[in-house]
Image (spheres, grey):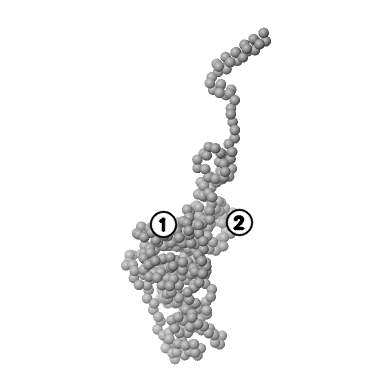
Amino acid sequence: MKTKTILLLLTGLAVVVGGLPAAAQASAAPETYYDLPLCLPGYYPTDPGDCLPLGASQSIARLHESGFPYPIQDLAAAKPPAELSNLPVRVARISGAEAPVYASLSDAISGGAVLRTIPDGASRYVTMIDSAQSGGRTFVRTMSGGWVEATPFYSWPRWQGLEFYATPQNDFGWTINPTPSYTQPSFAAPETGKNYDKYVEFQVYQVVEAEGYEWYEAGPGEWIPSLKSRRLVVERTAPEGVDNNRWISIDLFNQTLAAYEDGRLVFAALVATGSGELYSDPGLYYIYEKRELDEMQGSYTRDRSDFYSLEGVPWAMYYNHAQAIHGIYWPALLGFTQSHGCVNMFPGDAHWLFNWAKLGDWVYVHDPSGQTPIPTPTPMGTPAQEILYPTPTPTK
């Protein structure tokens, strides 16, 4: 009797369940559920299916949305050999007023026969192949001949740019003055606590304009202003007109120089280009003359107060009449316009570029801001500027 009662109850239960809607039946069935494991930290653009992209992977995804690659890698670059910064000749600096150049050391000491004179000016340097002292004065013998009172110059800039073995996927830059980084693109934002010295490279993952400057995101939550830095914009295609896939790109707005070969960035550095009315001309040119040592002299003001006379200018490459890329040993600041039209580089960078460049290589000078006037087209390949020597002062 008890068995019959149990069978009747089970039959009734089956009838009740069978009469329920399908959805109710499904909810009544037990679910099979288990947790997927966390994915290994990484960027997952689509659902991996067999793991959960949470935790560290979520942070990586947010960084990727902000333009940061994973993993964040250092620039595939290194400083060129330090010995490239050694000058090919010794130099000495002239100070004071007009400087007579004497035929011999004895003439220099006694004030004898004068070969020529070097006018007073803001920047005057001579090559030096010998030196002597007399009566507390120092005289040097120059490569061009003659002795002149001057101070041997042993301290010149040795900072160097970067030689690349792989083209970066993002822009990068250098500081041009010491600066902190900020948590937001604003001078009013809190500082990150990280400080950059002068001429330190950093990567650029995002660019915004704020408070009158470009701001560069150098890391997650870390911003550097263009007031204290310069950006090198990586070019991945050759400028129009370049037919041999070798070119030197000079950015007048950012004051940077980059060398490209076969579509790859091979070298980059800060430079100093022409200032004011003596700006470096935008355009596409080619290197028509290379000089390991050059002599430059001139003045552009009516009173000749800006006169300069520079012997032993290293590694000059002329590309636009008298405008050249060359090394500088005299005091200068990279990242600012300050020359008479030439592209100034520290010696090590000019030396590297001189060794790499060939006659006929293209030089692309441009200003992304559009502020530099476009020059009237003139024939390329004309000789460099003529060097004019002052008339010797008669001896009395």
The amino acid at mark 2 is Gly
Q: In front here: 310 or 190? A: 310
Q: Residue at x 60, y 15 (%)?
A: 13
Q: Residue at x 36, y 65 (%)?
A: 360
Tell me the quarter of the image containing the N terminus.
Answer: top right
Q: Position of residue 80 (x, y in %)?
A: 50, 64
Q: In front here: 335 or 51? A: 51
Q: In front here: 40 or 67? A: 40
Q: Is residue 87 above or below residue 240?
A: below
The amino acid at mark 1 is Gly
Whether residue 206 is visible to the viewer of this picture, yes or no, is: yes
Which residue lies under the disc numbered 2?
193
Q: Position of residue 387 (x, y in %)?
A: 39, 77
Q: What is the CA distance from the residue labelled 2 to the residue labelled 1?
A: 38 Å
Which element type, helix, strand or loop, lies under badge 2?
strand
Q: Residue furthest top?
A: 1
Q: Which mark is residue 263?
A: 1
Q: Relative to 1, is 253 on the left or the right?
A: left
- Residue 41, by quadrant, is top right
**Nearest to viewer (mark 2 / mark 1):** 1
Q: Position of residue 242 (x, y in %)?
A: 36, 59
Determine contact: label 2, label 1, CB under 8 Å.
no
- Residue 114, by quadrant, is bottom left
Q: In front here: 298 or 60? A: 60
Q: Residue at x 58, y 36 (%)?
A: 36
Query: Which of the marked residues, 2 or 1, is nearer the chain's N terminus?
Result: 2
Tell me the quarter of the image containing the C terminus.
Answer: bottom left
